[in-house]
Image (cartoon, rainbow, N blue to C red):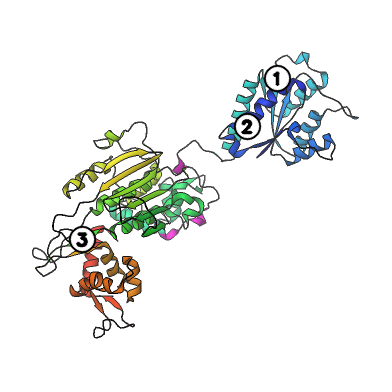
Amino acid sequence: MKIFISSVQKEFATERKALAEYLSGDPLLRRFFEYFLFEEAPAADQRADQCYLDEVDRCDIYLGIFGNEYGREDAEGLSPTHREFNRATEKGKNRLIYVKGADDGVRHPKMRALVNDAAGSLIRRRINSAGELIAAVYASLVRILEERELIRFGPFDATFCRNATLDDLDDDKIARFLMLARRGRNFPLPGDTPPHEVLVHLNLLDKGRPTHAAVLLFGRQPQRFLITSEVKCAHFHGYEVAKPIPSYQVYKGTVFDLVDQAKDFVLSKIDLWVGTRAESTQAPTKYEIPQEVVAEAIVNAVVHRDYTSNAGVQVMLFKDRLEVWNPGTLPPTLTLEKLRGPHASVPHNPLLAEPMYLTKYIERMGTGIRDMIRRCRKAGLAEPEIRIDAGFFVLTIRRKKPEPGAQAGTRSAPGRHQVGTRLALSGHQVAILRKCLIISPIGDLMEIAERTDRTKFRNQVLKPLIDEGFVQMTIPDKPTSSKQRYQTTEKGRALLEQLDMEEGRP
């Protein structure tokens, strides 16, 4: 928005300079405002009085500083300041008037009349110094930003999402939430509750408009309004960030989508152990990092991040660790040490956290970190490491080192299905099983496993799945045929169904 700063009287030279420097230097105001000072305007083939009026027409806010002097009068007996004020009034501009001094008796009669005229149509402020002028202007401009809803002082997730309407929300996603919330936490609203009533119940509307939380939870395209709400996932074969990145994905969608996609990314890259059916009709399965720990790390980053930051959530899997970064820091009542013990739940985005709780994505009572510690210990992993790094909350989970004698690329594991040898399904192999639910060529499967050598891929990745009976060839008599395709068997489907049940997939 453009501010026209009126008055070129010599008596306000100090105030005008100080105000201009402040407007251009303040981190908040300079984001929203620019100003016009006549003495800073470049030379032009135009009368000065016409230049003033043209700038008033172009401005959004007229800022008048009235003192004792009236100024040089034109043929009609009006000063430039008086004409500017009249033009701003005529054009319906937002007018801010500041009057220096309290003794109106010492003012030029026409200036006194102008001050009285202004007092009759709007609120004006009295000032005595440049410092008072700056403070008064700052308060007025912040109020304008609030009125125009350009800044907020309430929680981010509770304020309305600019330019978003109810049409930008997906009714099917709200219905799905309702189903999961009723199933997971006995949500009190009936299953046929209209979407608008669900939003009202969850306090996700601000004067009938969708809040940031509503868009993040149920938006058709949340990143259209909140660009940095995406999650970036990367997999590195080594111990440090290095290019080229073997596997890199940027996930978009609702917070539910982001959590599911990022979790699946990690689980597809780490090892999965499959045991025998010796003690049950279902074979036990176990990821090298408990899937509950992976899910908790990611959901915490997505739900509790600072959405006003230009940075986003990053999930990085290294050879020895999983790192999850999210912009933000701890609330004043919490410390890194307190996180490890019993503590109150202080969600950064409470309206975003509530639906995630109702669908069992997160738990209340501040138990998330302690649950992660307990699960890591049970899995034989080191406790998660937590730190604040340059405005990011960073959670690190150490992967288990291969035991002596274990083959490269595998981890010690229970026996194969129905067989005495050992089997460790990788995350890639599980992803291939899912892909082969639809008959697929080998090229598509190689992309999943990030392999380029076809022979090694067949022998090291596909053959174990075929030997175990999880995958079958469409042309078994010609294993290397160019028309060869692969599909998941009933046994493979049963394994996937078991995994989905354990992961809580609906």
The kind of secondary structure element at disc 2 is helix
The kind of secondary structure element at disc 1 is strand
Crowding at dot 2, Cα within 10 Å, few <14 / some 14-19 / many 20+, comes out as many
Horizontal and vertical percent position of residue 51: 80, 37
> On screen, 447 above or below 173?
below
Horizontal and vertical percent position of residue 242: 37, 53
Q: Tell which circle, 2 or 3, labels the residue nearer the N-terminal end.
A: 2
The residue positioned farthest toward the bottom in the image shown:
477
Q: Tell which circle, 2 or 1, labels the residue nearer the N-terminal end.
A: 2
Horizontal and vertical percent position of residue 39: 75, 31
Relative placement, left or right, of 62 versus 278 is right
Crowding at dot 3, Cα within 10 Å, few <14 / some 14-19 / many 20+, comes out as few
Relative placement, left or right, of 495 versus 308 is left
Q: Residue at x 32, y 48 (%)?
A: 323
Query: Which residue is identified by label 3?
Result: 408
Horizontal and vertical percent position of residue 464: 20, 71
Q: Residue at x 33, y 58 (%)?
A: 265
The kind of secondary structure element at disc 3 is loop
Query: Which residue is identified by label 2?
Result: 23
The amino acid beneath tag 2 is Leu
Calculate the distance from the C-alpha at mark 3 to the C-alpha at mark 1: 80 Å
Q: Residue at x 48, y 57 (%)?
A: 221
Quadrant of res 74: top right
Look at the image and give the residue range highlighted in magenta. 152-172
